[in-house]
Image (cartoon, rainbow, N blue to C red):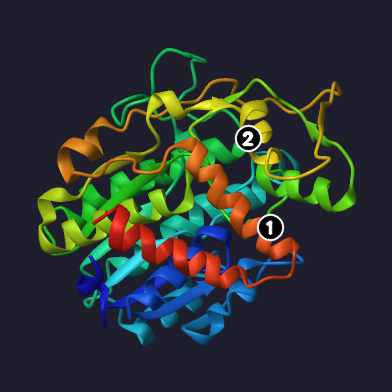
Amino acid sequence: MLDFYKNKKVFITGHTGFKGAWLCRILSLMEADIAGYALPPQTNSSLFELADISKSVNSIFADIRYLESLKQSIKTAKPEILIHLAAQPLVRESYKNPVYTYETNVMGTINVLEVVRTCPSLKSVLIVTTDKVYKNFENEQRGYKETDELNGGDPYSNSKSCAELATASYKKSFFDNSSISVSTVRSGNVIGGGDFAPDRIIPDAIRALQAQKPLILRYPNSIRPYQFVLEALFAYLLIIKKQYENKSFEGNYNVGPEISDCIKTCELVDMFYSYFENAKWKIQNNNEPHEAGFLKLDNTKIKETLGWQPRINIQQAVKMSADWTKAYLNKENYNVIADGQIKNYFVNIAK
């Protein structure tokens, strides 16, 4: 894995976001040649800035909805690998701005695919969607499989379902008989140091700590496939490598923890807050937009096809997130923590 990415030309959309910044940090340590295309960081604090990502990435700050700008940027970069992360990623925001959500998540993905089909340098493309693409039957007993119906309910989830369908159409229409490998990946809720997005549980928990107020939980008993950020990103990089070397590995993949590690939101918060003093939470009883109560992923396919498996359980994932957060809050060197986690994971844990 480490040798494969050395000097590879990688183009990342959405590189200024939480997962994008972690991915850039990983690839820079692997000595890849990275270009990124995204809006500037959208939060007051951002991992992109805290981790000095701009020093190792050629950044283009532009909107994924602008086809010509994207086309010119990819043409100039001449990448071998493209990872599409750019999105409007928040459920509650999608209720407020559904048109923008669909424009970004559907047409943004179509713009990427349109450029891909005219880019001769590309060999391996990964379209990142979400665990929420499936029609949710609120079934607590089983995880969704890649063959289950795609029909997310809220605008965010549905826009990602549409992105999956658009990718399938482009693959069938343009890529089946080409040398370009294209896969989609549906990953669970990712946690880790450096996430500052609104309406996500760990960032909200940190903001409550800083304000010395109780964290407000909207859905304390909702069950989600929480996983550490490096678990998902290692899977992404593995898919890209495998299909780069052999087109038969392209497809649709779930990336999530073991079912036993899918826990309630309140349990996650209790784990995280156990590392901090005077941390509390309470339930908000106001009417809120609908969100799925139960969501689990079946990760059998990626295990059997690519040999990937979860290596960090939920307790370890929460501790690693808390370690970065403590360093950040105490004004210590959080980048040393992050780089140590990356190196340990890729060299020792996931070898």
Q: Which mark is residue 326?
A: 1
Q: Is residue 21 above or below residue 233?
A: below
Q: CA distance from mark 1 to mark 2?
A: 14 Å
Quadrant for the N terminus, please. bottom left
> Horizontal and vertical percent for residue 42?
70, 64
Q: Nearer the viewer, residue 233 or 104?
A: 233
Amino acid found under the numbered disc labelled 2: Met
Crowding at dot 2, Cα within 10 Å, few <14 / some 14-19 / many 20+, comes out as: some
Q: In screen coordinates, is 266 left or right of 184?
A: right
> Horizontal and vertical percent for residue 150?
41, 30
Question: Who's the residue at 69% across and 64% down the image?
Answer: 328
Q: Is residue 296 above or below residue 231?
A: above
Quadrant for the C terminus, please. bottom left
Label 1 secondary element: helix
Q: In screen coordinates, is 40 left or right of 112?
A: right
Crowding at dot 1, Cα within 10 Å, few <14 / some 14-19 / many 20+, comes out as: some
Whether residue 126 is visible, yes or no, is: no
Q: In screen coordinates, is 330 left or right of 147?
A: right
Question: Who's the residue at 62% across and 49% down the image?
Answer: 101
Question: Who's the residue at 10% across and 58% down the image?
Answer: 246
Amino acid found under the numbered disc labelled 1: Lys
Q: Is residue 126 above or below residue 144?
A: below
Question: Which residue position is annotated with label 2?
Answer: 271
Label 2 secondary element: helix
> Horizontal and vertical percent for residue 131?
45, 36
